[in-house]
Amino acid sequence: MMSTITPKRLSPGSWYAVYTASRAEKKVKERLDQQSIENYLPLQISIRRWSDRKKKIEFPLIRGYIFVRVTSRQYAEVCNTPGVVSFLKEGGKPAPIPDLQINTLRVMNEGAEGVVEVSTEEIPSGTYVRVTCGKLTGLEGELVEYKGKHKVLIRIDHLGCALTDVSSSCVERYYRKK
């Protein structure tokens, strides 16, 4: 699929979300790795049970997307990678995602003791907090009540937000610099 977007419209070395073909996220990651294109595919592990066995299944946290950090020269290379459908766009241009949001998502996904959920619904802003205990110590986000539980939420531009359970005794309020 060719795009009318020219590579020079991209910010050099920015993170972008790339939409993939259905269930092709892991294959796209392999292909991008082979091309030495920096990428991040957040994965979760779930145990599936059948009548005769249990099996650990690894699946993408955000189905249909992989994140890439590319320069303008790598844009066409990513677009021509089998399994890539298009860049996530805003106003017809690829929409950059701040480094801090990708790094925070990485910390949350790799350190959460429970399930990390992704939501596209509008969740009202919460109190800004910093996690003070457990594997997520140092993670900054918003403390919200979601589906009756306290969760730390991080917002990801253009995609929604990621949430994970946290004990309210393991967070402290902080005042975010603007």
Image (tube, helix red, strand yellow):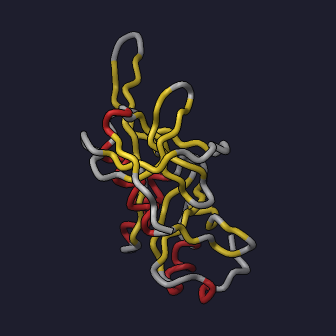
Q: In the figure, 40 relative to 73: above or below?
A: above
Looking at this view, name the residue that lies furthest to the left: 134
Q: Quadrant of the N terminus?
A: bottom right
Q: How many numbered discs, if any? A: 0
Q: Which residue appears at 42% of the width and 54% of the height? A: 105
On the rendered structure, is 24 left or right of 86? Answer: left
Q: Position of residue 168 (x, y in %)?
A: 38, 33
Where residue 57 sits, quadrant-wise, is top left
Q: Which residue appears at 32% of the width and 47% of the height? A: 110
Q: In the figure, 99 relative to 166: above or below?
A: below
On the rendered structure, is 147 left or right of 54? Answer: right
Q: Position of residue 167 (x, y in %)?
A: 36, 32
Q: Position of residue 34 (x, y in %)?
A: 37, 69
Q: Nearer the viewer, residue 76 or 151?
A: 151
Q: Which residue appears at 38% of the width and 61% of the height? A: 103
Q: Position of residue 67 (x, y in %)?
A: 48, 62
Q: Nearer the viewer, residue 36 or 18?
A: 18
Q: In the figure, 135 relative to 92: above or below?
A: above
Q: Nearer the viewer, residue 25 or 90?
A: 90
Q: Which residue appears at 45% of the width and 72% of the height? A: 69
